[in-house]
Amino acid sequence: MTKPHIAVVGAGIVGICSAYFLNKSGFQVTLIDKNDPGSMTSYGHACTFADYACIPVNSPDLFKDIPSMLLRSDGPLAIDIFYLLKNLNWGVKFLQNCTKNRVNHITNSLGGLLNSASISYDEIFSEVNVSKFIKKEEALYLYQNEKEFLKAKITNKMREKNGVKIKILSKNEIRDLEPNLNQDFYNGQLFLGSRHTTNPLAISKEIFQAFINSGGQFIKSSVENISPKDTSITLTYNQNNYNYDKVVICAGSWSNNLTKKFGDNFPLDTERGYHVLFNNADLINRPVGWSQSGFYLVQLEEGLRAAGTVEIAGLSKPENKKRTNMIENQARKLLPQLKEVKSTWLGFRPTLPDSLPIIGKSEKNKNIIYGFGHQHIGWTLGAVTGKIINTLCNDIEPNLNIEAFKPSRFN
Ligand SMILES: Cc1cc2nc3c(=O)[nH]c(=O)nc-3n(C[C@H](O)[C@H](O)[C@H](O)COP(=O)(O)OP(=O)(O)OC[C@H]3O[C@@H](n4cnc5c(N)ncnc54)[C@H](O)[C@@H]3O)c2cc1C
């Protein structure tokens, strides 16, 4: 009997991990991407395996915080008002998800998924040796003043309910851990047991290579159309049609361009984020999150990266230099020893208005399976999503409750 043939569209970390697990469980798998594997959003992020990051951007305080955030040129958020007005549906739905009840629901749902994130990666890492790209120095958050810290205390309670272990640190304790940091902050906290990577692209490439070595196929092409048939799904790329038994869509922020071709339209938008790469080595030992400006500093093999912030401005606008200048200036305040900037980068977090990913079978056709919309934590959730997608393709119920991620929730 021939094995069912599955196409995975999108070779970001979610698509690569999905292809890896599907191939392992015996499917014939073709991974398709118009770019090199792992080279888009999954390349330029802040590199944390952020199992602790169950708190969404949605917040009951957002209504009162947004005006001051927007007024501050060094704040974590920027909004292109004209873009937002054209895409009001996403903005309204996002605010509807800022009630206390909704935020609790989102936190607990993400918490459930995040609790299986590390163990799912470890399944891959037991076969694909990437240990030289992973560091166990735990992530540190810094708080600017007492007010910021008191806010964090509320979200810490929600994290702790979801199994996250936190250690509050005094200024002196932080100085002992990170002596090069400028001391202009109030206090901070460590996320116990967290880890990070020093080379995300290398990890993606290694998992991708393991997939290829065990019989997986990669096609570098842009998928232009998807059309479901009774017994197969047709993909159009390279100006031809190709039939597959099942298709998995992991195309990150671009997923809706494909799903809407067959009438599955999602309120998917992007939270743009940036990084600035400095020509430095060994100033910090761990990811350092600077809450007031919304970015992390992290030491990578290629330099010291300052990555984060949110900009609502869609997929087509070029890099906004004001944002990278802001990140550079704020990073230099925390680490005055930073040398020159090597490069800057713009990436596209795929975000649904409830900050929950879509993981599940399409309502339009059960042979189309989705894994996209992982917003700020897609790097962390790559492996667990791949595992769930594999169970769904095998028509098995996943052992995690994925009700909150079902595609039909926006109908
Ligand atoms: C500044 C910043 C910091 C971040 N920090 C962290 C962090 O520390 N920890 C964390 O867990 N997450 C972090 N994230 C989030 C994380 O990077 C993303 O959630 C994750 O990379 C999304 O992965 P993905 O595979 O869904 O998408 P992507 O990596 O974007 O991959 C999607 C792929 O689909 C392909 N594609 C799209 N359309 C088509 C088509 N029609 N045909 C063929 N191919 C197609 C694209 O070429 C792309 O390669 C951060 C993000 C940003 C921007």
Image (cartoon, rainbow, N blue to C red):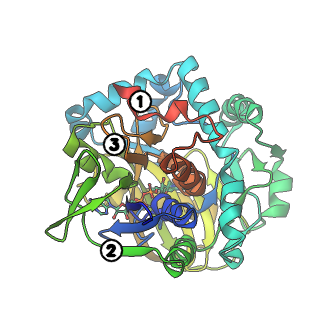
Q: Which residue is label 3 attached to?
A: 269
Q: Is residue 367 above or below residue 31?
A: above
Amino acid found under the numbered disc labelled 1: Pro
Mark before the other along the chain sequence, 3 or 1: 1
Q: Residue 35: horizontal and vertical position, in percent?
A: 33, 71
Give the image quarter of residue 344. bottom left
Q: Earlier in the sequence, mark 2 or mark 1?
A: 1
Q: Which structural element holds mark 3?
A: strand
Which of disc 2 and disc 3 is earlier in sequence?
2
What residue sits right under mark 2 in the picture? 219
Q: Is mark 1 within 8 Å of ligand 1?
A: no
> What is the CA distance from the residue labelled 3 to the residue labelled 1?
21 Å
Looking at the rendered image, the disc whose residue lies closer to the viewer, 3 or 2, is 2
Residue sticking out furthest to the left: 239
- Report the residue at 20% width, 45% height from top: 261
Is 214 located above or below residue 148 in the figure? below
Image height of 92 relative to 174, above or below: above
Which quadrant of the render holds ligand 1? bottom left
